[in-house]
Amino acid sequence: MNHKTLGIIGGTGWLGRAIAEALLDSGFIAAQRLLISNRSGASPFGPQVRLSADNQQLVAQSDVVLLSIRPEQLPELQINASGKLLISLVAGVPAATLKAATGADTVVRAMPNAAVEIRQSFTPWYSAEPLSEADHSLVQRLFDCVGAADQVPTEDCIDYLGAVSGTGPAYPAMLFEALVSQAVAAGIPEHIARKAAHGVVVGGGQMLAHQDPRRMIEALMGYRGVTAAALQSMADQGFETILGRALQAGAEVARRGM
């Protein structure tokens, strides 16, 4: 971050901490230029990372403020971030609301997911105001430290993607449990069902990291075998429509504020 200082409000929560650790490990920021605030005053970081229980003090000492708190905590935040670049990870809170609540000149909304823990998150981000080239680069590189990131053209994209990539492992986890439940109902011992589901969700996910999903589906459908029959049944029952409704339901929660 060159000579800029980054302050993370909520930097010892699971999300803030994972991001802070990635920024330090990657060399994106030096420890002495990172500030962390939390209520307890306890820090899991080394002595060079400054810790504060006073959020306003952190803001005053930072060039860039990363806000990693729950939406319901925003009303009690009470900071003045005038003149600062504020990067918000707060789900469901519009940029205009954040700007009014914090006084920040520039607000960026971002939506990482739980895969920040393994540095495989996809993080869409949106800036309510035009960014300088330096600030644009800073935001992009910051989130590249925990996976991949892209700037999106509208704020609505952040709310919708909160129900897509923002869900992290939730959809694969639900698929995993459904596969186990159905296999057990069909008479498969549960420990075997779980190993089979693991092969589908975890093994299949690793394969998709290196193969084109559409081509994979087309190839499997071409065999006209067991997999093709299962996929065709899902398509006939409106799998994509069901998923679309689920995404819209999640996005609506984000749009109206959590």
Image: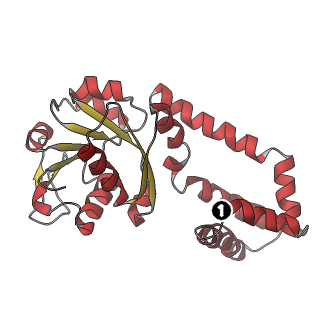
Against 150, residue 118 (above or below) is below
Above or below, 235 against 99 in this view is below
Query: Percent from the top left, x then y, of residue 61?
Result: 8, 44
Quadrant of the snapshot with the C terminus: top left
Look at the image and tell me whether residue 68 can be seen: yes
Q: Which residue is mark 1?
A: 176
Q: Position of residue 54 (x, y in %)?
A: 11, 41
Q: Amino acid at mark 1?
A: Phe
In the rendered view, would you say 253 is above or below 221?
A: above
Tell me if 138 is positioned left or right of 33 in this view. right
Residue positioned 24% across, 47% down in the render: 134
- Give the quarter of the figure containing the N terminus: bottom left
Q: Nearer the viewer, residue 244 or 138?
A: 138
The quadrant in which residue 73 appears is top left
Residue 239, given in percent of the width and then of the height, sits at: 77, 47
Residue visible at 63% across and 67% down in the picture: 208
